[in-house]
Image (cartoon, helix red, strand yellow):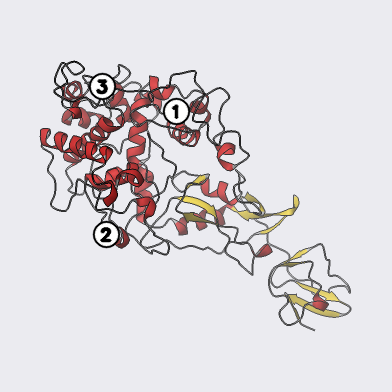
Amino acid sequence: MFKLGVLTTLIGCTLAANSFAMNPQPDPQNPTGYIVSRADVEASEKAKTSDPMYAIWAKALVTSPNSVVEAIEPGLASNPNNVKRAERVFSQSEWDFLTQMAAPEYTYTRFLRAIGKFPAFCGEYTDGRDSDAICKKSIVTAFAHFAQETGGHIAKDNVWDNPLGLEEWQQALVHVREMGWSEGQVGYTTGCGQNDWQNKRWPCAAGQGYFGRGAKQLSYHFNYGPFSEVMFDGDASVLLNDPGRVADSWLNLASAIWFFLTPQAPKPAMLHVIDRTWKPSQREIDAGIGYGFGTTINIINGGIECGEHNKNKGQPVNRIRYWEGLAAHYQIPIEADEKNTCWQQTPYGSLNLEGATDVLYTNWDGDWTHHADRPEGKSFECKLVAYQTAYSALIPGDYEKCITNVYESHPGWPEVRVVDKVEPTPGPNPNPNPNSWDANKPYNTGDRVVVNGVTYEAKHWTKGDDPEKSGQWGPWIKIA
């Protein structure tokens, strides 16, 4: 069953910058809030995502309009280039060869449309890598997992149930819905209706079931919502209100391609393992994680299928058999540094990457670092984290949403409004009046007040701190 759960990843690179000189100011429209400039927000995000891998991840998740996708048919000259490549390396006859037991909802046309939605799948490499070979290996890898996730698992010599004598790796895509479930049943609603950020961003619809559907068995509202946003221009409600579309349209295969391309912290995207854009970090190498089919098992279900204790378990043994059978049939070369197994790997869920400097993440959460020179000591920034949050670094606009806490995921976060321009704070009054300090007014670094004829200057942001009682370590310093 497909449970994405976490949408971030890692790659062997240097950690991006983690702070930027934000300049929050009191909000003239909200006595308890603050404003920050959009330029500051954009610069902060850019500083944290300066590593080139962020652009690669974002490019891999670029999608084509559904109007273009739904015009795709086998053999059309108007098909996108990546679809033409897929047709070239994996024809209708190859599809038919591997889907003789498949549910009728899975078709070659829908397969091509799923690929056409994501130009990076079977895309063009201009750096010398073999684009056709990567495309073919990607498709065969996907089918090895399809055979495990939604396959028939019927022995070749079982003539009663398998009269054609099909290999198990030829039995992919038998199930379009999770066994035991059908449309109209309410289920897999764990967490639905709670007053949390997941429900604010991806609210469950009454009467809907979010059980497994499609080639990778998409499950739970916090996966249907993000997938819907990708498929329908940021609109999570489409599939939350109508999850059955994941079974009954080309989305049944597009959900698998989406998973194939989406990094999950601390796991890389499967495509980037296959095409070697990903470079394992030192801690991954130490944990036995490197190139090969085994790492794609770890990405999908490492906690259950990888590690020494799972060496002889049915699921990984099946996946490996299916991969090896498919790879032999399609003459996919296995490189010397590739391993088909993951029993020698630490499952990603057990891999401690805390403090690693060669790791990048792709979800935003509030940064609670203390900043003495900013209001309330808050950072007014977000940071990259290794778990699923309401905000993705791969979705334009999500950093601003994180800073303004749109989905209320940061309890105690300051009220922030992003504006195009922040007017400068008036400078200190050269002729302050006696007793001009106001206990209800916030003061920024450098502001001056007079209390009983004595002038004080703020050392950092402060509110409600009596200058006369400030003391050596307080926020005020006596000037005159």
Q: Is residue 443 above or below residue 134?
A: below
| In front of the other: 475 or 284 | 284
Which is more foreground, mark 2 or mark 1?
1
Residue 151: mark:
none
Looking at marks 3 and 1 on the same chain, the residue that comes earlier in the sequence is marked by 3
Q: Tell me, yes or no, whether the two marked residues, 2 and 1, touch with CB atoms within 8 Å.
A: no
Q: Tell me, yes or no, whether the two marked residues, 3 and 2, touch with CB atoms within 8 Å.
A: no
Secondary structure of the residue carrying tag 2 is helix
| In front of the other: 107 or 351 | 351
Residue at 35% in and 62% down: 358
Q: Residues within 10 Å of mark 1 (few under 14, many from 20)?
A: many
| In front of the other: 332 or 156 | 156
Residue at 81% in and 77% down: 469
Amino acid at pointer 3: Tyr
Q: Which residue is mark 2?
A: 285
Residue 108: mark:
3
In the picture, measured across the screen, residue 455 lies left or right of residue 49, that is right
Q: Quadrant of the N terminus?
A: top left
In the picture, measured across the screen, residue 57 lies left or right of residue 426, that is left
Residue at 35% in and 49% down: 267
Cα–Cα span, label 3 and label 1: 24 Å
Q: Which residue is mark 1?
A: 211
Question: Residue 226, how many percent across, how many down?
Answer: 47, 36
Decide if residue 136 is in sight here.
Answer: no
Q: Quadrant of the C terminus?
A: bottom right
Q: Residues within 10 Å of mark 2 (few under 14, many from 20)?
A: few
Looking at marks 3 and 2 on the same chain, the residue that comes earlier in the sequence is marked by 3
Cα–Cα span, label 3 and label 2: 38 Å
Amino acid at pointer 2: Ile
Question: Residue 409, how many percent across, how many down?
Answer: 59, 47
Q: Residues within 10 Å of mark 3 (few under 14, many from 20)?
A: some
